[in-house]
Image (cartoon, rainbow, N blue to C red):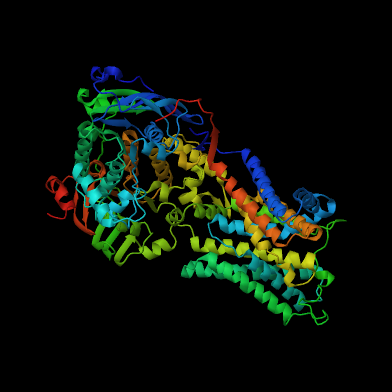
Amino acid sequence: MSPNPSPASLALDPTAIPPSDPPLIRLEGLSKSFGPVRASHDISFAIRPGRILALLGENGAGKSTLMSMLAGRLQPDSGRIFLRGEEARFDSPKDSIAAGIGMVYQNFMLVNRMTVAENVLLGQEKHFWVSPKAMEREVGELTRRFNLPIDPGAGIWELSMGERQLVEILKLLYRQSQVLIFDEPTAVLTPVEAQHLFEALRNMAGQGKSIIFISHKLEEVLAVADEVAVLRRGELVGHWEAKDIQSKEELANRMVGRTVSLEIAKDSRMPGEPVLRVEHLTGPRLDDVNLVVRQGEIMALVGVAGNGQKELVETVAGLRPPGSGSVKILGTDWKAFFANPSWKESLSYIPEDRLGVAVCREMTLTDNFLLTTRQGFCRGPWLRRKLARQTVAEKVAEFNVQPGRPDMLAGRLSGGNLQKLVLAREFYRNSRLIVAEQPTQGLDISSTEEVWRQLLQAREHAGILLVTGDLREAMTLADRIAVIFRGRIMDDFPVEDQERMKRIGLLMAGSG
Amino acid sequence: MRLIRVTKRTEPLGWGSVLVFCAALGLSLSLACAALAVQGVAPLRALALLWEGGFGSVWSLEDSLRKAIPIYLCALGVSFTFRMQIWNIGAEGQFALGAIGAAWAVLTFPHLSAVALLPLMMLSAGAAGAFWALIPALTKVRLGVNEIISTLMLNYIGILLLNYLVYGPWRDPGGRGFPMTMEYPAAAQIGMLGGTRLHWGLVLCVVLSVLAWLFLNKTRLGYEIRASGESLRTARYAFMPYGFLVFLVMGICGMLAGWAGFVETSAVAHRLQPSILVGYGYTAIVVAWVARLKIGPMALAAFLLAGLRVGVEVLQLELRVPAAFGHILEGLVLLTVLAGQFFHYYRLRLEWPGQRAEGR
């Protein structure tokens, strides 16, 4: 690895932060290894009440390990945690919750069929008999105190992702957590919801809570954090006051350990034959959808989550039969195409849910690679695992999956590396239609860059339907953009059309 | 101030699992002894008799191995379905149907030579067992019926069917009214191995184990079975033929359990009679779980549990311990071994007070 860039603005001594208040929580030399892998090494920092600390780092940099040690899910091999100056140790999440440390995970842990108040009080009921009214009153007081716009009597099933996140926050506030940890909190939010979250964070910090939030989105880090700490390969490479950081490029370089461009070049090319043709598709959540994807182009389908993208994608990927209307893949009708789908030069689907759908965590990389390519590794009834293992070793190196041992369990890979494994597998199939659903969600900068490059490269021989909630991703990659709202394609235009590009936001909200 | 800390294991347990297994076994035996002591039976004497009866002599070892054969065949069968998370507990009924299938072949073609009759019995026993297992497979795939319920129910039907046949149409007229078929002709009996009391069923077990291992680890279908067991959503995503695989594993299980029924009637009972149904199909479930569905450990567990069965029979005779004691012992083994699997996922650390500064 090249020597780290160290511009003057970033070369701050970690101890330079003025110790005006005593820290609420202090880590001293925290280390944790998994076998030979050093996930956290000698990490020390402190955070004072009323401060927001952003913890930046690439996938596999050790952010999750560090936070899991704070949340009591993992125990450090060495090092100490001090809470208000006293040493603490957490053997289970219970211990750390009791000590006032709360964590909001990326996947919310809420009971869908219960109300907000019931979820907040779940497991915390004071008496055997519980009165819904009293619960709602109590939770209502809490929402007013912290100025969180949410109705305690609403059912979880009615709420948006942003509101569900507020419920998770309420749970922690109800348990009187003093340190709140957020794991990539904006990954599931729309831009407006993210702004609301930031306000809520500042509000809570204003009332003396310490907030740690994990992210790799530089803009939001600079927008909301008071302090920024950067992890790389399990080590803390720096800890600064946010106001002393000049530009996000410098921060990105610091995080990745090399210069990154944040821009990606794309040349335009002539689209070829249509590989996907959807006509008048109507069904659950879908309303007369018309869409054409041609070989050699990337069609981005943008919209706020839950507007029919999932239904459309699952239909195209063969997991859900189409209602009325027609879906033609590579010129073949849906039913005929999926009656006997070929593994090669046909259709690849890169699902949003990596661990639940695309990959089995308890199987090796080789076996996971075989999931959709197994027909290519057969000789009669026999599966040629040795050949597969060799191929996986090559592909894993080509796609920079780390660590890339073919016999390793997939569950050991970080999110970005898991996605690279899925891409390696799906691109191995030389598919002519690729459906990529939120392909860079939860990925760090360098993984995102790699995934984008791979998708652009695949455009050479395939048509790509890119379903994304990230407008920047759509604008960077797409040749055409389609906007979906309540199951309808609102408009469909080339990215060069400046006038219509400006109206995307309006289209996503259903007007224009 | 806590002395024992529980933490999640990050590395696999390895050889420690053997230790855990032995400890669990020891615990279940001591619990069983305690139960005997309450009954006024000398526990040490009982233990000695149990060992003597199950494993202590060539005679008892042979007996245990003979009993282990049908148990192992059934366990091998259910392990296929468990691997796919199909909770088939119908090995007992499939075993009964296999025995019926074999008996049908003998009673229909009593004069065939062994070369023709034994393969025919095997064919009809396997087919009958597989047929019995495919019924719940069909209702599961087509109608979404829970296989736990349907396989359990079919056990009772299979057992009643066997009883009906031996009390009715297939009853041996010369059997002085006992519910059993005629004794099989020599051509329908599986021969013994050399000068031992072990029969060729043992060789069948070895051959089938190798085949099962090859199938599960080296073929595409074996891979698809495993992957479908890991995650149904992934199986759908990768277009695994899930419905077909359910039929396949259920069919294989039924066939293997059916062969267990064939081996037991042909080599041990020499006729079809209700007393062949002593719960081997249920013991097989215990065996499969205790061995975590691995083929080698399943063979060992089958031998062990068969030995306990034989030993308990001796206890019944010598100490007048009730027959239910065998079930109690089997249940205890399953519970303690399953509880011991806690240590596959977690580790305990002992810590003395004062070793660390107190938290909080």
The x, y position of residue B279, in whole percent, is 68, 64
Classify residue B188 as left or right of residue A326.
right
Q: Is residue B242 above or below residue B355?
A: below
- Residue A329: image location, x then y, percent: 34, 59
Which quadrant is the C terminus of chain B positioned in? top left
The relative height of residue B257 versus residue A75 in the rendered view (above or below) is below
Above-or-below relation of A227 to B278: above
* Camera-side residue of A425 and B213: B213
In-front residue for pair A341/B347: B347
The relative height of residue B168 versus residue B83 in the rendered view (above or below) is below
As drawn, is B123 to the left or to the right of A97?
A: right
Q: Is residue B12 visible?
A: yes
- The residue drawn where x is 48% and y is 57% is B240
Question: x%, y% of residue B270?
Answer: 80, 69
Rendering quarter of residue A278: bottom left
In the displayed structure image, the side of residue A500 where residue B125 appears, left or right: right
